[in-house]
Amino acid sequence: MDFATIMVIAILVTGVIWLIDIKQWKPKREAEVAKLKRAGAAEDAIENAGKEPILVEYSRSFFPIILAVLVLRSFLVEPFRIPSGSMMPTLVVGDFILVNKFTYGLKLPVINTKFLDMGKPQRGDIVVFRFPKDPSIDYIKRVIGLPGDKIRYQGKTIFVNGKEVPATSKGQYTSLNTGMVIPGLEQREEVLGDVVHDILVQHGAPSKSGELIVPDGHYFVMGDNRDNSNDSRFWGTVPEENLVGRAFFIWMNLDFDDFDMKWDRIGTSLK
């Protein structure tokens, strides 16, 4: 059971309890209080008769909070944590990111049905999506191919509709954790449409080569850590209905393994 389902159930439970109290229990309490006052009962007895049950009190207090959280996460922004290095050097393990949930349209929580179309992914967007092989898992990759594009990956180079995607070497990659140069791992600046970003390629590592035409309503995605990413080269394209949103901001970085926080990554805009 995912978080959205839990939140919807919590809203239904607290909302029903609060509604029953408004319609039935509260009028009975008020009638009992009025009766005791007319009879000249003690203040303690009147107070106890009008006291709201603890279950109702909690429901009334938590209902608007849960509703606000669900609306925020479902329609505006949702936080995610990066668990792997497949998007290095753009995203590293421990990055906490924000994902824009309305860029590609608004969806109803739980059933994930789009009810308002807002736009389409663009080449170069960093997207969070439900993994086609197991929709209970969220993945994050970069959009390389749009519907109808012919994508070819060969010799650690991308070709979109027959044109090579430019990538300029920036030398060997320096680890953010140790500050040491990693032999064989090269950092390149790639120009993907209007998006300029860095990628990593590992010399000596085998590359998954191939060519395909992206089906209608689907997207071809890849990790920026090209030789260490499980992406569309291996399991195919992402259906549009699996899209969760576009990643746009790093709001914190914390590696739980050693509780090391990288302060310089906080507030980084993603591209």
Image (cartoon, rainbow, N blue to C red):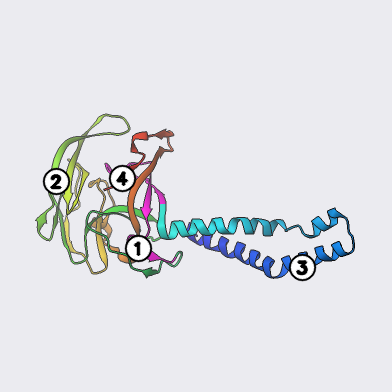
| Residue 95 in sight from this viewpoint | no
* Amino acid residing under circle 3: Lys
Q: Nearer the viewer, residue 269 or 222?
A: 269
- Label 3, on which residue? 28
What amino acid is at disc 4? Ser
Task: Give the numbered dot on residue 141.
Answer: none
Q: Amino acid at mark 1?
A: Asn
x%, y% of residue 57? 67, 57
Q: Residues within 10 Å of mark 3 (few under 14, many from 20)?
A: some
Task: Find disc 2 in the rendering and name its residue.
Answer: 167
Image location (x, y in percent) of residue 52:
73, 58
* Residue 142 image point, x, y percent: 26, 53
Picture quadrant where residue 185 is located:
top left
Mark 1: secondary structure: helix
Query: What range of the chain is rendered magenta?
Result: 79-108
| Residue of label 4 | 269
Q: Nearer the viewer, residue 139 or 253?
A: 253
Classed neighbour count for the residue bearing mark 4: other residues with Cα under 10 Å, few (<14), some (14–19), many (≥20): few
Residue in view at x 37 percent, y 53 percent: 99
